[in-house]
Every structure is written in C-alpha cells, then in structure tokens.
Image (cartoon, rainbow, N blue to C red):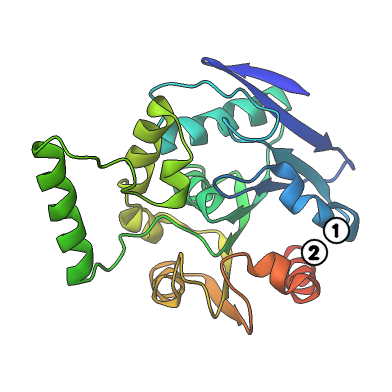
C-alpha cells in the first residue's frame, strides 16, 4: 500500500491480526522493509512494515527531511490505520526514529526494541578530526573532495546527502531518559558501525531496559544470529 506524506509516497505492508498492539518494524539506512519481513510468521501479533524514503518502494526524491520528519510520517500513518498501541523494533537508522517516537508518544508505545541502534553522539578519535581538517583544506583550495565520506554518504545524490548529514549530526542522547517503555537493546558484539559502548549507554540511560549482546555478530546482528534474535524478540514481545 502507498500513503502520501508531504512530498513522498510511503510504501507499507500492514498485517492485521486483530491484536491490540501492532509490532512496527523500522529498517536501517539503505535497507527496506523486506529485511525484517522474516519476523512476521514467527510472531502472533499484528505487524506493520514500512519503507523509509528514498528506499524500497517509497519515493526516491525527497527534500529537506530530518529525522523528526520520519517520526512524524509514522505518526501520520498510525493515525490513518487507526493504530493505537505499538511495539517498535528499530535497526540502526530505524532505531533513531523509534527513540523519538518512544520519548514523545509514551502512551502509544508499549515496548521498544533497539537493534544495533544509531542515534547517540559518537566518540571521536584524533584521526577523525585530522580527516575533517584535511577535507576543509582541500575544499578551500578547490581540490577534489568527492571521495570523502562514508559509503552510505557517497551513494547518495545531492539532496539526500544534505538529509543524511542532518540525520547523523542530530544526536538523541537527551531523549533517552524520557523513554518509559519496557526496552530491549540487542547488539552484535563485533558491531563497528554502532559500537558496544553505545549499547551500554542505551542500557544505562533508558530506565526500564535490558541489554543482550549476540556473540559472533556485527551491525546486522538480527541477520547474523537470526534464530537467537527471533527467540529474544518473541519472548520479549509476547
């Protein structure tokens, strides 16, 4: 199904099993709703899967979106579908959106699952700041800077790069104490994108939370350790 929100068509799939709570799966940056679709048949509750633009079957061309636009988009979709209670399961970028929703929609969010979630201010090494300085010097001298940036950043067009920069520089640390939902934090022990110190901060700052670290798993721990992830999810949500 498609829903128009601002300048974008949002693709979603809603499996209504007539349960009071809907499990909402929020994929990571560069992924799409299908990355979480394997969870549907394992769980007994209603489920909503969404493609965040510009990924999957949602619109490719958006402008001036922020992380709060994505959160507002979901609130609008919940209203259209008459969804009153949700469990949020967010991976990486999807975790950013889930954090905002959990902090501002306390009565609607029953449970929160953060899977290798992004959103926290990262620790930076001295090498990082040298790299930023080199980029600024080259740009000022008119030299080629096209190869500076992460793989996610370099894969984007001009408008999406602005959106991406805004998102990664919006840190959500101060939202964590406002989350009252029962929370499960699941991280891969070898995650280099969102390292384990972030998982521990989630556990420390979100009052009613539990941390599980999956062995031999990276940033996509729900893929690397699928069966363990499904068992954790089922026990926590049901």
The residue closer to the viewer here, 24 or 54, is 54
* Viewer can see residue 21: no
- Which badge, 1 or 2, comes first in the chain's sequence? 1
Distance (Cα) linking label 1 and label 2:
8 Å
- Residue 189 in the figure: left or right of residue 50: left
SS type, badge 2 = loop
The residue identified by callout 2 is 238
The residue identified by callout 1 is 43
* Viewer can see residue 198: yes
Q: Looking at the image, which residue is at 51% across and 72% down?
A: 191
67 w.r.t. 126: above or below: above
Q: Residue 6 location in percent, x, y?
A: 52, 16
Q: How crowded is mark 1: few (under 14 residues within 10 Å), some or many (20 or more)?
A: some
Q: How crowded is mark 2: few (under 14 residues within 10 Å), some or many (20 or more)?
A: few
Rendering quarter of residue 184: bottom right
Tell me the quadrant of the picture where the C terminus can be found: bottom right
Rendering quarter of residue 188: bottom right
Evaluate if marks 1 and 2 touch, with contact meaning CB atoms under 8 Å apart: yes
The furthest residue to the bottom: 215
């Amino acid at each position: 199904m498609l829903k128009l929100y601002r300048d974008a068509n949002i693709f979603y799939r809603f499996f209504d099993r007539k349960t009071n709570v809907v499990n909402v799966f929020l994929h990571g940056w560069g992924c799409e709703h299908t990355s979480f679709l394997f969870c549907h048949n394992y769980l007994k509750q209603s489920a909503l899967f969404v493609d965040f633009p510009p990924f999957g079957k949602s619109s490719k061309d958006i402008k001036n979106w922020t992380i709060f636009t994505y959160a507002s988009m979901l609130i609008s979709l919940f209203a259209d579908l008459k969804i009153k209670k949700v469990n949020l399961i967010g991976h990486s970028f999807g975790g950013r959106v889930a954090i905002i929703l959990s902090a501002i929609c306390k009565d609607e969010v029953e449970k929160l699952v953060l899977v290798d979630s992004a959103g926290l201010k990262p620790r930076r090494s001295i090498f990082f700041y040298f790299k930023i300085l080199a980029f600024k010097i080259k740009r000022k001298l008119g030299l080629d800077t096209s190869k500076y940036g992460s793989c996610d950043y370099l894969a984007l067009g001009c408008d999406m790069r602005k959106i991406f920069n805004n998102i990664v520089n919006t840190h959500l640390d101060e939202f964590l104490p406002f989350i009252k939902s029962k929370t499960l934090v699941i991280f891969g022990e070898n995650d280099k994108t969102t390292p384990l110190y972030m998982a521990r901060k989630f556990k420390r700052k979100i009052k009613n939370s539990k941390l599980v670290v999956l062995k031999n798993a990276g940033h996509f721990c729900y893929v690397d350790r699928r069966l363990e992830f499904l068992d954790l999810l089922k026990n926590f949500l049901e």
